[in-house]
Image: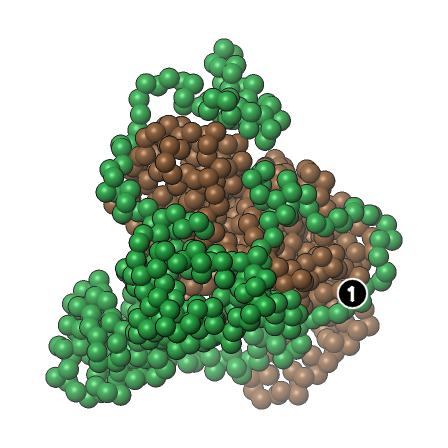
Chain colours: A brown, B green
Amino acid sequence: MSDFTKKLGRLRKAPENFLSAEQIAQVQGGRRDFLRKAFLTASATMAAGGAANVYAADRKDWDGDKGSKLILDKPEWGTTLGRGVDEPPYGMPSKYEKDLVRRISPGLAAVTQANVAFAPLQGMFGIVTPSGLHFNRSHQGWYDINPEDFRFMVMGEGKLIKNPKVYTVGDIMRMQPVSRFHFIECGANSAMEWGNVALPTVQYTHGMVSCSEFTGVPLIDILEDCGADLNGVRFIMAEGADGSHENRTIPMSLVLSGEVLVAYGQNGEMLRPENGYPLRLVVPGVEGVSNIKYLRRIKLGTQPFATKDETVGYVDLMPDGRLRQYTSVMEVKSVITSPSGGQVLLDKGLYNVTGLAWSGRGKIKRVDVSFDGGVNWQPARLEGPIHNKSFTRFNIPWVWKGQVAFLQSRAIDETGMVQPTYAELRKIRGTRSVYHNNAIQTWQVEENGDVRNVQLENS
Amino acid sequence: MSNSKIRKAALAVVLGGAFACGATAVFAAGVPVNARVPSKDVKLDATLGRAATPDEIKAWNIDVRPDFQGLPPGQGSVAQGTKLWEAKCASCHGDFADSNAVFPPIVGAYQATKQDIKTGRVAKLADINDGATTIEKLSTVSTLFDYIHRAMPWNMPDSLTWDETYALVAYLLNLANVVPSNFVLTRDNVQQVQDMLPNRNGMIWNHGMWPGKEIGNGGIPDTHNTDCMKNCAPAPKITSFIPEYALNNNGNLADQYRQWGPIRGMETESKEEQEKKAKEKAAAANSPGAKVVALLKEKGCIACHSLGDNKLVGPGYKEVAAKYGGKKDMVAELTTRIIKGGSGVWGSIPMPPQSISEDDAKMIAQWIVDGAKQ
């Protein structure tokens, strides 16, 4: 153990992580040259490729050559009494997870009420987004509305509905519910990346998507309860109760299929206020903005409604200057969430490469991963069960030998659609269409372990 | 087709028939997992909810359709719109709907050309180097009516009358050179205005991204990548990346991931900068102003009032403090104004009454008089 620097591996964190207590004392005593030397030696070791697979973080806890004090000594948590079972009554994540929170991207909007807080996809597992981390897009701020004061109305043009009705939240909860896993993705997810790389981490490039188990009543059951003329209805408008009174034209085909839900449950509890408590519409597979929060009204109609967010927002500008309107479906997409942009691999060796895939057209059939920037691909392992219009988690083991690598994932959905490259998307849609960017994402792993968001010529 | 037949047909299409069969094989051998049993078929002989009254429907039936169904009779002139705009809209959108400070520009520098009005296509939208303002994209005038009336002004949504909405739409159309400055927009001439809208023919519906047959090509994608597995592309060549100096634009990335384990976040901020920020944060947390600032954030005050001296919708707190700083006798007056709202002191945009306790309002008032220090 005399020449500890030779066993440092690739650790590049703060000095105290690879200095012994004695050496830290030396540093604190003013011997800064020692510190610099230690850094240099460590770098030389790394460059020579002779790093042993030992975390220096372990070393500071060693007792000479005997082993780790974490094992040799008895810890506080094993030798004292822990806390009571009802403390706190609503459990919170460990304090060591405090940095995985929703975040706003600076410069995107001037005010927090018309903005988006991105979900920290880089630290999540499985397919469920914890409710408190579900991305939050609001147009005029969110409210926590008393369910007793909340009313939901179904009405319509002329003869399309026999009995226009008002429901309480309690009324809706007396009907037969279904519980289904669905993703919600903002139409503008990855919008900043259309022309070039703009954002450092997966939280900002892809964090406007989340997935929950939603519980609610199929809208069609409620329409039938109102005596709707399903032959005559061609378009439906949904509208929110909050200040934006957000309204959108909802595809009738999805309503008829039973997929559209008037939802109150999210991951086993009521919806979170930021996500539409006490009632929201869930329209699986389409732009997030159609999943109207604080749902107050459904209107049955015969024409599309050309609302603000389907006429001057959420329209896709094509190279010829025309705008695609009513582009609703979120097409097949995937992203590697770890390792991903802004991260650092501290050591060579085995990693789990993991990510998420989803499609607004149905189930995910396959996800391929490339480590060489799209030259060669291999299928990743999908975690089941695979749900319709839901996140699907993929994993694949990878041994990193210190070389430059370009990580990509490519999803294929049950309709056979293969996630496109940037080159393909731009050829057809240019670089200004803002919405519906479902391109293959590239993360570059550099020789020093840094992971960067890059775009490649061939993809 | 009857409703239940329509639904079963739709189910059969979407779910490959399996669920439709499940729903008809009711209960004989137990209920299949996930079977949807339409309440209609169960004959529960009970209904939920109650009839909506005509007045209730009228109160909420506020949408305006592209053919102007839903738009009540009314009128508004460009001149009236100008006044309203200055009073209620200009602080966020700029005097000429050209500001990019709070929201993207609505009109910007756009002036409808004769050619645009004739073709119904805004020609400059094809310019790859040009952004697109709201009015340039707009294909239906109804959208302006629907949105302005339901959601504006931003901090007092759903408060404009229909006549006011007519006037504001007239003002925006005049700014964009679609109608003259002496124009009066009415229910009777609104269709004529629609027929002049510069981008009325600018939308494409023939695409594959509408789920259903009502719009589009039935769902045919426009990209056609293949699932090639070997030698699919030339060796990678980087065309775009984030330069070093911009890596910290979203804050120190090391603080946005776990602080343990074999993968960490990248340190994009120097140790000195981090320590400086930590010190500032600690100082702020201990300052008497911290509690007030937290309250201002919680109550949404900072949506309209910045903590500095710059005006958003209302004056910044530093601006208010500059006026009332040290005037202890103003605490009671400011407390009342916070609770009850007010107008006229800082411009014509009124501040609405706030749901805030008297103690909290007094604390804010005292903080302002003490200089609005963070």
State whether residue A214 is above or below residue A372. above
Position of residue B233 measured from the top left corner of the image (x, y, whole percent): 84, 57
Element on which disc 1 rests: loop
| Residue B326 appears in the figure | yes
User: Around disc 1, counting alpha carbons within 10 Å, would you say few (fewer than 14), some (14 to 19), or many (20 or more)?
Assistant: some
**Which chain does tag 1 point to?**
A
- Please state the total of marks drawn on the protein image: 1
- Horizontal side of B140 relative to B344 (left or right) equals right
Position of residue B261 measured from the top left corner of the image (x, y, whole percent): 61, 60
| Residue A63 appears in the figure | no
Foreground pick, B137 / A335:
B137
Name the residue tied to disc 1: A457
Q: Quadrant of residue A198?
A: bottom right
Position of residue A14 measured from the top left corner of the image (x, y, whole percent): 60, 74
Foreground pick, B186 / A359:
B186
Label 1 is placed on what type of residue?
Glu
State whether residue B291 is above or below residue B189. below
Residue found 79% across the figure and 56% down from its top = A374
- Horizontal side of A327 relative to B161 (left or right) equals right
Residue found 61% across the figure and 44% down from its top = B216
